[in-house]
Amino acid sequence: MTLVSDSEIAVDIGAKDGESRPVTLIFPPLIESNFGSFFPSTAVLAAFLGENGIGCSQEDLNEEFALFLLQDELLDRLGRGQVDGVPEDSLVAAAARWAAKNRDRLIDAQGRHCFGTDRYGADSKSAYAMELIARPFSLDPGPEVLRAVRTGGHPRDAFEKFYADSRITERISAGTSLIGISVPMGPQLEPSLMLAALLKKSHPETPIVLGGPTFSLMEPDDLSMLLRHHPAIDCVVRFDGEHPLLTLAQRAVGGSFSPAGIPGVSYKEGDEVVHAAPAPGPNINKLPVPAYPTDALDRLADPALAITQARGCYWGKCDYCDFIELYDGSPPFRGRQPNNFVDEIQELVEKFGVKRFKFITESIPPAFARRMSQAIIDRGLNIRWNSFAMVDRRFDKEVLGLMVESGCDFLIIGMETTSTRVLKLVNKSADREENLRFLQDARDVGMKLRINLIPNLPSTTFQEAIDTLDDIKGLVDCIETLTVFPFEATRSSNVGRNPERFGLVSTAPTEVSAQAQYALNHFHSVDPAMTPEELAEAVRLYRAFADEVSRRQIIDVSGPDVAGSLRIPVEDIDFLDREGHVVGTHIGNRERVRIPAKAAEFLEPYLTGESFTMTDLQSKVGERGATALVRNLLKAHMLVSAKGAPHGN
């Protein structure tokens, strides 16, 4: 498989044909949750620079990395267990084998990417498979990355090969005056540093600027260390990036590049590192419409465009959250005006024909949601959208119903817990009663909810965790999916700054759990409210229930009529022969089943998708054996009715 064709090499924004495009903006790997989509950071910056006369090219290396992962040789190595940390019988290896056999479900006949971001939507199998395949390549290093200590080996070797295969150094034109790398997420940090070093070798005179939330959340001392040990980086932009990047680009284009004196920029000055205080960011109601690159969108089968609703959070008081730290120098909350916001949606619909949108916000405000929804309805915009929201008493049935009518697919709710005591401790807005009311009202108007739970918010006891789980189980019909996030304190939150207030005990640095997405910002602590055994059990119970809830959205939990003709949906399952017994992994519903050698022998004719009946099985293994086989396959949701076409993606 070709990694990137000549026609896909670059996307030019902000200048007319024949005019120079002196800035190249790059979005690096790896954010697997953004595969099949286009992250808005470079599009927002390109539009702002373009409005001010600076032409831009955009490079989405994250999406290209998805194609890199789908190369025959790499999928084969993953599937055979030949990549470090990926045994042959692992979920990752199963996903790789499935992907190798189902390329048409990942990339269609027009070459468009079908591996979207919704694990519970129409593309759930391809999205989940891509997430698993990418997992071994995720890097989230600790302090060693600041000092440029490279340990080598997988997965760093994979990124080096990817950058070489992508020919990214050749794709930066000789007329480029500045290279900007957008780094929103912690796992992009090390790949970005590797990329910067590579680009500086090939373009030694071109300034390289990094920016994004990863650096805005970084402690100044850590950022100083990074700049001292990574000479390829000329400076780092923190907080709002538009004004600092514009000034940097103007200086670079004018031939006198210097980061000195620019608010919000960190840079080396001799042996010292200067962290210039930020200035207020732009009025987000006056920003131009993001310059989404048409060529990039054309590669996506069903793109969802991100549109900024706010910067900051209208509540902004949750003590465990650090996203309110991202816009220092500006008001803690800057929201869009509803009509201005809907104007942007309408323009994007008319320009690209896109009908799906993700609203970028920490939490959509109820008053805004009401007015925006009514405007969408009044203009007759036939769109689908989703957003983060918080439980707020002002989200009553009327507002929620209006949001559904305007096209809201679902809301993502950081409910975390229903313990009123814990909610008040961490300064959440709602209490138990309000949370339960919200769930019921949303169900009554047909609003789909995706609920996030944290079983161990600071000071939560085991009994409080179980009480929350019981509350949620009692209202399971109100919830589309559940996601469980074990709590991890961050240094840039109030909890990390004042751990004793929340019952946490600071500890020496230890290995960060796999849950972490930005290890450098992790605050090492223990919470004596639960023993390690209690915490493990609480997380297990939460995740088991979350799997049960989520599975309802992916499969028909009622199962087929076993009196009729049956088939194993082999198009959704990876089978691995393990010394006689067979391990089946259902990519759709996340179930795994071990089929003993004798049973596998009887089932072998049907592992190709051939239909059968209970009578067929009984003739081979008897009534008792047939009943046991069917019962176990049904339990793993690996039987469907043989009528109709095979289940698709």
Image: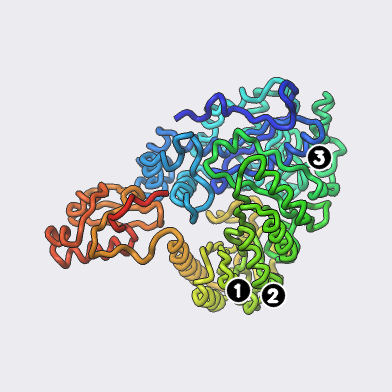
User: Alpha-carbon neighbours of circle 2 within 10 Å: few (<14), some, or many (≥20)?
Assistant: few
The image shows residue 311, relative to residue 53, as above or below, that is below
Residue 575 percent across, percent down from the top left: 30, 48
| Residue name at image x 43 percent, y 58 percent | 554
- Residue 43 appearing in the image: yes
| Residue name at image x 39 percent, y 37 percent | 77
Q: Separation of disc 1 and disc 3 at Cα?
A: 45 Å
The image shows residue 133, relative to residue 255, as above or below, that is below
User: Which of 433/647 is in front?
Assistant: 647
* SS type, badge 3: helix
Residue beneath label 1, please?
441
Q: Amino acid at mark 2?
A: Lys
Q: Which quadrant is home to the N terminus?
A: top left
| Residue name at image x 64 percent, y 72 percent | 397
Q: Amino acid at mark 3?
A: Pro
Residue beneath label 2, please?
424
Residue 505 percent across, percent down from the top left: 64, 67
Q: Which mark is residue 244?
A: 3
Query: Could you say which quadrant of the image residue 198 lies in?
Result: top right
